[in-house]
Image (spheres, grey):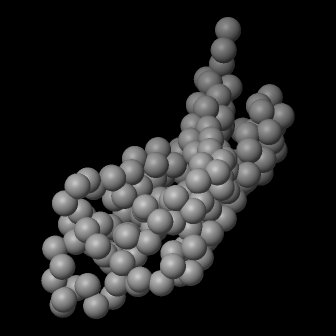
Amino acid sequence: MLCYKKSQRLAIIAMALFPTLWGLLALLNNTSGFAGTVQYAVQPMLAMTDTYGNPAQTWRAIESLWVAKVALGLITTVETLAGVLGLIALVKLIRTISAPYADFQRAKAWLIISCTLAVLVWGVGFAVIAGDYFLAWQSKQTLATQIGGLIYAIPCFLTLLLAVAHREEP
């Protein structure tokens, strides 16, 4: 029979799949379609081409192709770090599933860092900076940038909360 302590640990391990898989799949997707993502997603968003066109807001648009490439490179780097650190966390968490609490707690530190990076890139980067600074919320076609960022950030944020709040009786 599964004990309560082990079921809590299994829940944390399962939730660790969010930043891990999304981060690693982002690496695969961003590197396999880098030029297209720059051309069709990042550059138009930075250039604010799909906004209401209010000059009082669009003064901050960035039209440079090299900036779009650097931005996607930075996004890919942070997403990849979230995935790699999440994978390290998964391995360490699985190895310590039956170990003393202090060992499992140390393994969670990798997950906490992974989730923090995930929340920063998808929550702060996509939902806040892309969404509000570059006005992605004004998109006439879709709100995919901001909503997509939140779809990725929220489970990672919940995983972060779970990992930080998790405590065990000695």
Instruction: Identify whether 23 is placed above or below 45.
Output: above
146 or 119, nearer to the observer: 146
Q: Is residue 91 left or right of residue 7?
A: right
The residue sitting at 66% across, 14% down in the picture is: 2
137 or 96, nearer to the observer: 137
Residue 105 in sight from this viewpoint? no
156 or 1, nearer to the observer: 156
Q: Is residue 41 left or right of residue 79?
A: left
The residue sitting at 25% across, 68% down in the picture is: 50
State which quadrant residue 48 falls in: bottom left
List x then y, in percent, for residue 140: 19, 60
List x then y, in percent, for residue 73: 62, 69
List x then y, in percent, for residue 82: 65, 55
Q: Is residue 47 left or right of residue 2?
A: left
The residue sitting at 22% across, 71% down in the picture is: 51
The C terminus is located in which quarter?
top right
